[in-house]
Image (cartoon, rainbow, N blue to C red):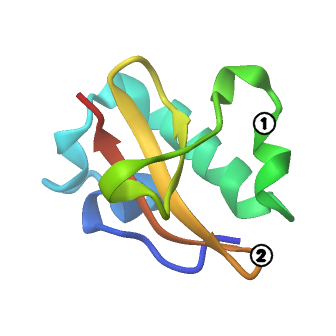
Amino acid sequence: MIRNFGDKATRDVYDGEGSRHSRQFPKLLHGKIVRLLDQINAAPNVEVLKAPPGNRLEKLRGDLKDFWSVRVNDQWRIIFKWENGDAIDVKVTDYH
């Protein structure tokens, strides 16, 4: 379950808000972002997010070593921490 979002833009996309914050992400990606956020919200554990393989679930390293990510596309990722069965600090980020 998603416990909290890391920024207003990600929350607004998930809630379907057409705010200035949500417009920082390409509109064409909003549907896929929402689908991935729904998968994260429904996941009983982080390993479930390995399917489908297109999610490309990975544990991050370096400054983001506490985070996991799933890919929206080659440029955008959803990053989050997994703690006690919940996703926290969920955020869409430009990974390049």
Q: Which residue is drawn at 69% across and 62% down?
A: 41
Amino acid type, label 1: Lys
Q: How far apart are marks 2 and 1 (CA)?
A: 15 Å
Residue 58 in the image, given as x and y percentages of width and height = 60, 39
In the figure, 58 relative to 26: above or below?
A: below
Q: Pick whichever of labels 2 and 1 is earlier in the sequence.
A: 1
Tags 2 and 1 touching, CB below 8 Å: no
Residue 50, numbered circle = 1
Residue 76 in the image, given as x and y percentages of width and height = 36, 31
Identify the residue position indicated by label 2 in the image.
85
In the figure, 18 relative to 35: above or below?
A: below
In the figure, 58 relative to 91: above or below?
A: above
Residue 42 in sight here: yes
Q: Which residue is drawn at 37% across and 23% down?
A: 28
Q: Which residue is drawn at 68% across and 20% down?
A: 54
User: Is label 1 in a helix, a strand or a loop?
Assistant: helix
Image quadrant containing the N terminus: bottom right
In the figure, 59 relative to 70: above or below?
A: below
